[in-house]
């Protein structure tokens, strides 16, 4: 055991390492060791013995992008694996290549490895500190040397290190090595411990932007394998990380914890922003400073699990997150099921962020030969604030995270707000004319078109019976699509394929297909139950419901996939008693595979992800969709906040924002708010005055002809937050900076003052033009019509003509070539 004074010295030593500069460290030591020269001497000795190499390595970390940090760690291990003849430790190795790196200079040696200055040539040229780690050493000696290496190793997102830390706890009895495990398994013979040792790794360059690193680890005594997978997107500064767990033992292994990712960070302070809410108030920002202990953000509701909180967060180092400065991480889990993000601040003030499927009630038995692949965790980092973090996510999403992210989106008219369940064929066809008149591209027929014995004329019956209601729509869906097409608009439809109403033919035939628990009365939510997707026959049924709706009706080119309840009684009549805890995991993997089949088999069908408002918003499901429905709350005042929240992770091209009458706000305000995303409408056109119709039609034309190219594909800059200003302001800038659109929404009466756009080309001259003005009105913007250079615009701003609550302004900035 170590004595108390050494323990105290170590405590101060690690805290001192957190100080960025030597001067700051001195000031810190003056305080921490005041009146205790012996303590100071011990700490200083420890600091001195910290090798040059480690110091260089640590110092270089903040300057490196996360992708580089992780790749360089990996490349070191690779070198050992690939060079059986010896380690890279001698000077003659300089000039040698290790994967994408060329060794330039040996910096020094630490307890467990050697640090080099290296140059990476592809996909992007940059210099990195490359640490060759001798993970081939036996565990005991690694542990023995581990303390000196701890800081450096801690920066690596590497469960092997976590295991070493845990082992350290047992061997040395040091409580500060005890961490929440990223992975916990009970082996076939009942052994509850796992030791993972590095075996090998490979870095595959997928293309000029993407590299995939796979690090293989193995338990030295069990045929139990873990592969850490990191997909790095260089241009977007995004890493996707997941873990593959393979059991080759002669019996099942029980997985109790299976995080996708568990990085360790070190900073003075950690500020966590979560995006919580409930029905109609989704994605509400809430930021707090993390204190010692574990803060858990989670969801336990099994499916469409982001109802109360989305599986995405912002983590700011050292200070509350700012838009355009400061070190900020963004994290987002690609999983529509229950999730857990556990933020564990230890007594050294290190933060460990364990992110993945929620292990609560989801213990998984992995049979021999099976591999469990966790969902991927998305990470990005910026030292230019959370604005850049969002732009990284957005760019990544458009290129890799959603369907057709670099195209456009149709403007649609949905009938839900206008008719709810009260319609028939005549009414629907009459709405097509209104859609055409307004300039919509597509009409979306919402809930209520199906069910016969149990007609879906309200929300109490019909779910599961996906046959068109012949009473209401006697000519069927293809007829409706043809009618829409004749008017030059596309036709789309609503489905809620995972659900069943007890009042349905399906439930009468197969009550055992519903999720539920023995001896408990079914817990209905919106009168419905969820279907048990762990059962193959149900998976097949759900797929057929979709296929049988779309295939015979090729005129349907849009699908809104809804899900109006979550799981409150996880139980399956299909799974054996010992595997009940598999239900939610099997459910969500099955769900994603059906969604992926939808995208593959129906590439011409645009798809919206909806879930009783924004209950399912995650990049696991979004991969197969074009947009999501952020909220059933379409009051534009509230939407400013909701869209603001989601914009931290999801680009405008993914957000279906509709103009409705909700809240009775001025129509211009509603249009201006919806136009900053993917514009749509939920209006009964026949109830609009001719003036209102003209306003909406002009807005849609403007959006289609001038704005959406920039808003849907441009970079977003959040300028003034509605959380701390009487107004909200944001701008979008086209990729070549030649066009920008600035939106200002007044939420409380206040004197107008300049709003400063960002992201413009300082040298370029932009013509300022306020748009979407009421017919015949001239802009009151003093600079309207002027041409001003980007630098001046960003420095002095523009004074939008908004002072009163619900006034708004849309200003185009058109660069002169
Ligand atoms: C909930 C959705 O969020 C609404 O837009 C609408 O589609 C209803 N369900 C229909 O039941």
Image (cartoon, rainbow, N blue to C red):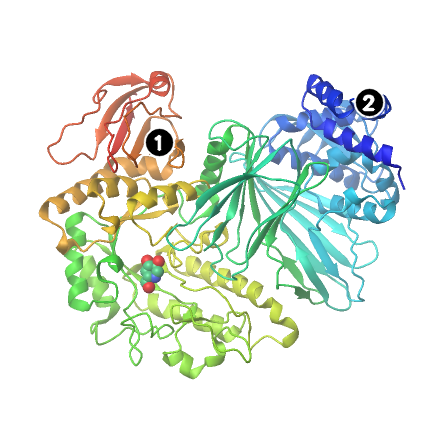
For ligand 1, give the image quadrant: bottom left
Q: Quadrant of residue 494?
A: bottom left
- Image position, residue 350 (x, y; %): 69, 37
Mark closest to the chain's N terminus, 2 or 1 = 2
Q: Secondary structure at mark 1?
A: strand
- Image position, residue 638 (x, y; %): 33, 45
Q: Quadrant of residue 270?
A: top right
Q: Nearer the viewer, residue 118 or 759?
A: 759
Q: Residue furthest front?
A: 35
Residue neighbourhood size for the residue with mark 2, other residues' Cα within 10 Å, grouped as few (<14), some (14–19), many (≥20): some
Q: Nearer the viewer, residue 292 or 62?
A: 292
Q: Residue at x 28, y 36 (%)?
A: 707
Q: Quadrant of residue 141?
A: top right
**115 left or right, relative to 442:** right
Q: Secondary structure at mark 2?
A: helix
- Image position, residue 189 (x, y; %): 81, 67
Q: Which residue is mark 1?
A: 731
The mark found on residue 44 in the picture is 2
Would you place residue 178 above or below residue 774 in this image? below
Q: Nearer the viewer, residue 75 or 363?
A: 363
**190 left or right, relative to 422:** right
Asked whether the viewer can see residue 250, the reply is: yes
Asked whether the viewer can see residue 559, the reply is: no
**Marks 2 and 1 in Cβ contact (< 8 Å):** no
Q: CA distance from mark 2 to mark 1?
A: 50 Å
Residue neighbourhood size for the residue with mark 1, other residues' Cα within 10 Å, grouped as few (<14), some (14–19), many (≥20): many
Q: Nearer the viewer, residue 665 or 339?
A: 665
Quadrant where the image shows the C terminus: top left
Q: Residue at x 79, y 66 (%)?
A: 190
Q: Tell which tag, 2 or 1, sits nearer the viewer.
A: 2
Q: Residue at x 38, y 65 (%)?
A: 496
């Amino acid at each position: 055991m170590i004595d108390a004074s050494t323990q105290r010295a170590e405590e101060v030593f690690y805290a001192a390492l957190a100080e960025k500069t030597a001067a700051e460290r001195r000031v810190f030591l003056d305080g921490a060791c005041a009146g205790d020269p012996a303590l100071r001497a011990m700490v200083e000795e420890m600091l001195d013995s910290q090798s040059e190499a480690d110091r260089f390595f640590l110092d270089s970390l903040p300057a490196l992008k996360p992708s580089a940090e992780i790749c360089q760690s990996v490349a070191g291990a690779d070198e050992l694996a690939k060079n059986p003849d010896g380690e890279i430790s001698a000077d003659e190795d300089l000039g040698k290549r290790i994967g994408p790196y060329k060794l330039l200079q040996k910096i020094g040696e630490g307890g467990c490895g050697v640090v080099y200055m290296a140059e990476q040539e592809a996909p992007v040229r940059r210099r990195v500190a490359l640490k060759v780690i001798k993970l081939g050493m036996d565990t005991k000696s690694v542990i023995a040397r581990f303390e000196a290496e701890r800081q450096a190793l801690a920066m690596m997102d590497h469960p092997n290190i976590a295991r070493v830390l845990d082992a350290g706890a047992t061997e040395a009895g040091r409580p500060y090595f005890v961490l929440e495990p990223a992975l916990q398994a009970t082996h076939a013979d009942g052994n509850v411990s796992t030791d993972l040792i590095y075996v090998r790794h490979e870095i595959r360059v997928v293309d000029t932007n993407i590299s995939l690193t796979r690090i293989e680890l193995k338990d030295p005594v069990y045929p139990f394998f873990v592969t850490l997978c990191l997909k790095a997107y260089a241009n977007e500064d995004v890493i996707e990380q997941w873990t593959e767990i393979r059991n080759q033992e002669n019996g099942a292994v029980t997985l109790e914890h299976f995080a996708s990712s568990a990085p360790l960070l070190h900073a003075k302070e950690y500020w966590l922003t979560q995006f919580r809410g409930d029905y109609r108030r989704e994605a509400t920002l809430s930021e707090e400073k993390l204190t010692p202990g574990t803060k858990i953000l989670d969801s336990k509701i099994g499916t469409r699990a982001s109802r109360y909180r989305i599986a995405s967060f912002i983590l700011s180092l050292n200070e509350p997150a700012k838009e355009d400065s400061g070190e900020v991480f963004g994290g987002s889990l690609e999983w529509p099921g229950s999730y857990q993000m556990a933020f564990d601040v230890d007594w050294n003030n290190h933060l460990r962020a364990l992110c993945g499927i929620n292990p609560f009630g989801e213990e998984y038995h992995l049979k021999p030969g099976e591999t469990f692949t966790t969902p991927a965790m998305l990470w990005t980092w910026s030292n230019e604030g959370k604005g850049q973090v969002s732009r990284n996510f957005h760019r990544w999403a458009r290129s890799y995270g959603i369907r057709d992210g670099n195209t456009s989106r149709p403007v649609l008219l949905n009938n839900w707000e206008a008719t709810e369940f009260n319609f028939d064929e005549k009414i629907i066809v009459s709405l097509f004319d209104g859609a055409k008149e307004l300039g919509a591209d597509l009409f979306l027929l919402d809930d209520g078109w199906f069910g016969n014995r149990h007609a879906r004329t309200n929300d109490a019956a019909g779910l599961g019976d996906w046959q068109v209601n012949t009473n209401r729509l006697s000519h069927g869906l293809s007829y409706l699509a043809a009618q829409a097409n004749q008017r030059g608009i596309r036709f789309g439809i609503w489905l809620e394929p995972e659900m069943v109403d007890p009042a349905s033919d399906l439930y009468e035939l197969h009550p055992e297909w519903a999720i539920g628990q023995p001896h408990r009365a079914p817990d209905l939510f919106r009168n419905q139950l969820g279907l048990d997707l762990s059962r193959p026959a149900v998976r097949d049924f759900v797929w057929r419901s979709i296929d049988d709706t779309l295939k015979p009706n090729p005129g349907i080119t849009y699908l809104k996939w809804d899900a109006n309840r979550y799981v409150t009684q996880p139980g399956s009549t299909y799974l054996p008693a010992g595997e009940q805890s598999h239900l939610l995991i099997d459910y969500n993997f099955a769900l994603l595979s059906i969604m992926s089949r939808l995208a593959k088999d129906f590439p011409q069908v645009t798809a919206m992800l909806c879930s009783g408002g924004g209950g399912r918003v995650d990049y696991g499901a979004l991969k197969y969709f074009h947009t999501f429905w952020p909220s059933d709350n379409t009051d534009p005042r509230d939407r400013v906040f909701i869209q603001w929240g989601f914009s931290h992770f999801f680009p405008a091209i993914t957000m279906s924002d509709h103009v409705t009458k909700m809240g009775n706000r001025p129509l211009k305000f509603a249009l201006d708010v919806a136009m900053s995303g993917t514009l749509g409408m939920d209006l009964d056109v026949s109830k609009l005055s001719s003036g209102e119709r003209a306003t909406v039609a002009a807005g849609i034309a403007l959006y289609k002809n001038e704005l959406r190219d920039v808003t849907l594909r441009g970079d977003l800059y959040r300028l003034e937050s509605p959380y701390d200003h009487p107004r909200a302001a944001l701008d979008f800038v086209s990729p070549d900076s030649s066009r920008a659109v600035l939106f200002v929404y007044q939420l409380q009466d206040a004197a107008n003052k300049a709003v400063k756009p960002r992201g413009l080309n300082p040298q370029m001259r932009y013509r300022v033009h306020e748009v979407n003005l009421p017919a015949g009105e001239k802009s009151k913007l003093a600079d309207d019509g002027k041409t001003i250079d980007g630098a001046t615009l960003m420095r002095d701003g523009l004074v939008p003509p908004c002072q009163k609550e619900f006034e708004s302004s849309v200003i185009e900035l058109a660069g002169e070539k």
